[in-house]
Image (spheres, rainbow, N blue to C red):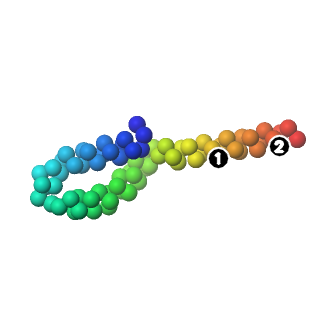
Amino acid sequence: MNDKNLSEAIKNIIEKELKAISKLLPKEVISNIESKISPQVEKIIDQSGYIKKSKYKNLEKIINELENRISELEKN
């Protein structure tokens, strides 16, 4: 599951649980709550050992570049 799908799934769960309350609150309040909760949820996900796909791709790129540099140094 990619990070967008995971975030969307968590958002859907929270919305489902708060459905009765959300009928009483304006959408702006819900959006405000989401913007405050989202970074905390992402932090919890990171602490669980999961990383975003973009972060994985960046790390993979760095690793490949380092491996290429090592190979070049070994040739010389």
| Residue 65 image point, x, y percent | 70, 44
Task: Locate the N terminus by quadrant.
Answer: top left
Task: Locate the C terminus by quadrant.
Answer: top right
- Categorize mark 1 by other alpha carbons within 10 Å: few (<14), some (14-19), many (20+): few
Left or right: where does residue 36 sit relative to residue 52? Answer: left
Q: What kind of residue is marked 2?
A: Leu
Q: Which picture quadrant has residue 70?
A: top right
Pointer 2 or 1: first along the chain: 1
Left or right: where does residue 20 sit relative to residue 10? Answer: left
Secondary structure of the residue carrying tag 1 is helix
- Tag shown at residue 73: 2
| Residue 60 image point, x, y percent | 60, 42
x 72%, y 40%: residue:
67
x 17%, y 61%: residue:
26
| Residue 41 image point, x, y percent | 35, 52
Name the outermost residue toward the front: 27
Q: Is residue 62 above or below residue 40?
A: above
Q: Is residue 27 above or below residue 48?
A: below
- Categorize mark 2 by other alpha carbons within 10 Å: few (<14), some (14-19), many (20+): few
Q: What kind of residue is marked 1?
A: Ile
Left or right: where does residue 51 sit relative to residue 66? Answer: left
x 54%, y 44%: residue:
56
- Tag shown at residue 16: none
Do the residues bearing badges 2 and 1 touch, measured as CB atoms within 8 Å? no
Q: How far is the residue under mark 2 from the one under mark 1? A: 17 Å
x 63%, y 44%: residue:
61
In front: 53, or 50?
53
Location of mark 1 (residue): 62
Secondary structure of the residue carrying tag 2 is helix
Q: Is residue 40 above or below residue 51?
A: below
Q: Which picture quadrant has residue 68?
A: top right
| Residue 13 image point, x, y percent | 24, 44
